[in-house]
Image (cartoon, coloured by chain):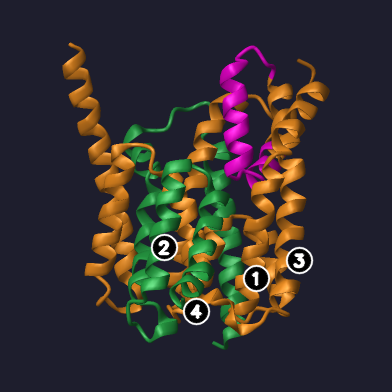
Amino acid sequence: MSPRRSFWLGFADGVPFIVVVTPFAMLFGLVAVEAGLNLWQVLGFSLAVFAGSAQFTALQLIQDEAPTLIVIATALVVNLRVGMYSAAMTPWLAGARMRTRAVMAYLIVDQSYACSIRRYEENPDWAVAARVAYFFGTILPVYPTWLAGTLVGGLVGAALPEWLALDFALPICFLAIVAPMLRTFAHMVAAFTSVVLALAFSWMPFGLGLLVAAVLAMAAGAVTEVQVERRTNRSVV
Amino acid sequence: MGPDTQLWVVIAALAVGSYALRFSFIGFYANRDMPLWLLRPLRYAGVAIIPGLVAPLVLWPEATGGETDPVRLSAAVATFVSGYVTGNVIVAMLTGAAFLYGLPFVLSY
């Protein structure tokens, strides 16, 4: 597979995500303007951070008037996911130039990661150049859509009437993102722990309760995964 | 710190932090395997924080002064169930919106 062909294959794999990214991006712009951000700040957010769920999280905590440090720490914990993607992609990109990898890092999101890792595993014979080109192909339809979508959402949001109950757009958005992520028992345990502990710790100052709940919920997920693995191995033997 | 300054500080810090997370492994960890004790909890980062963030917003919405609101609660449950069953984010959002705007309309009859 030549890099040129793998680039266009990536582009074709990325195009369907336009349908998913557009409403999500518009919703961010809309909710952000509703929260009092101006269009520059909305665009700055999407351009500089480029991570939907972390952006939504930061927005919610700013509205809750959480201290700046807590806002940053919590949004970054949400974004630990992209660190995991980075780790998973690393073995496939051995030998790629540092400059290339530095640009790729900025563009690691759910969509580019999900497409790439699938194709890499499907086609282990691809050269590194083809893998890199494929990755850039997947992000080409997604990145402009994200930026344009947030901007359009911001423009529309400023003109929307009050009765739309937009205060609840964010919770709906989060629930829609998280429900499909509960694929395994360990994911469900982590989510359940997060809900129970976040409610139980809501008395903690500075929004610390959520951060503590998140760390414990991550641990709960990891421990459950180990337990489930042990049990499966035993039943096989 | 004014709200405008706070916002730009958050944006700048998240930009640097997110980039560091993305670059960390791809840049520095090349050709080495990640230790499993670090990878395993990372897998649950998304589902460990978002449900905890949403739970109080669903149970005690600010718009109703912290009173549990049957319409908002129903919309939340419908969104979650739809997302879980279909595995589709957009379908889940549309279901939630349908409940949020449709339910008051249906209930008024």
Residue A152: mark in rendering? 3
Q: For marks 4 and 2, give the CA distance.
A: 20 Å
| Proximity of marks 3 and 4: CB atoms separated by less than 8 Å | no
Residue A88: mark in rendering? none
Where, quadrant-wise, is the N terminus of chain A in this rendering? top right
What span is colored magenta in the figure? A100-127
| Proximity of marks 4 and 1: CB atoms separated by less than 8 Å | no
Q: For marks 1 and 3, give the CA distance.
A: 8 Å
Residue A63: mark in rendering? 4
Q: Is residue A119 magenta?
A: yes
Classify residue B97 as left or right of residue A175: right
**Residue ID for mark 1:** A30
Q: Nearer the viewer, residue A182 or B84?
A: B84
Which element type, helix, strand or loop, lies under badge 1?
A: helix
Q: For marks 3 and 2, give the CA distance.
A: 26 Å
Give the amino acid at mark 2. Answer: Ala
Q: Chain of mark 4?
A: A
In terms of sequence position, does the residue under pointer 1 or pointer 3 come before the other?
Answer: 1
| Nearer mark to the viewer, of 2 and 1 | 2
Chain corresponding to green in the figure: B
**Residue ID for mark 2:** B76
**Colour chain A is painted in:** orange
Q: Chain of mark 3?
A: A
Give the amino acid at mark 4. Answer: Gln
